[in-house]
Amino acid sequence: MGEGIGKRPFWMHQLAEYMLGGALVASGLQSRTPLIPSLLGGLIMLNAAITRGPLAAFRGIGRRMHRRLDLVVIALTFFGALQPWVSIESGARFIIIAIGVVHLVVWTQSSFLERVKTPKQAPDASSGDRSTDLGRSAGRLVGGGVNAVRRARAKHDTPDDAS
């Protein structure tokens, strides 16, 4: 399957990251050991906020870079849950691992393609298709002729004020 075909749009990816990050911050705030869950949740939300996309707050990095950074953030999530130096409650540790798994699933199901903006054509610009251009020219020619006849009739039908 090609990149972006059958995958979820990027705005859904960003929304999921905001929700996952918010859930980690909330679980950290309810824990006796809030440091790691809160930091990881903030990191996930920051990563979503700085990426150019529909739900971005700052639009600092492109989606290709975000795709790579997501893998780093997911790895840091698992590392943060399993690291031995900072104490984490077992319930918070389970939530961190679960959110890391969900984040990985969201990552695999998301499209990171950026839409290419096509320049808008000026109304009078050539379309590049000869038949379309010929049709437009003919329509303008006929329209100009009809307008000229209408102007001539209107001029002829107006009463003279001099009589």
Image: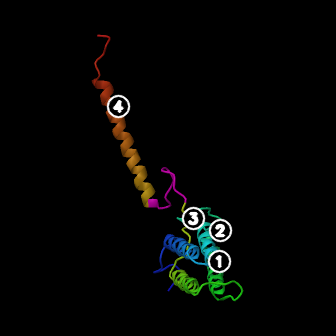
Q: Quote the CA–CA distance across marks 3 and 2.
A: 10 Å
Residue drawn at x 31%, y 13% is 161
CA separation, marks 3 and 4? 55 Å
Q: Nearer the viewer, mark 3 or mark 4?
A: 3
Q: To which residue does mark 3 refer?
A: 56
Amino acid type of the residue tagged 4 in the rendering: Arg
Rendered image: mark on residue 61: 2
Q: Magenta residues?
A: 119-130
Gap in Å between the C-alphas at discs 1 and 3? 15 Å
57 is higher (above) or lower (below) than 148: below
Label 3 element class: loop
Percent x, y of residue 130: 46, 60
Q: Secondary structure at mark 2?
A: loop
Residue 24 placement, left or right of 141: right
Residue 50: mark in rendering: none
Vertical position of residue 104 compared to residue 136: above or below: below
* Quadrant assignment, res 61: bottom right
Nearer the viewer's eye, disc 3 or disc 2? 3
Q: Name the spot of residue 144 as percent of width and height, x first.
A: 39, 41
Task: Judge by depth and name the residue closer to the eye, 111 or 157.
Answer: 111
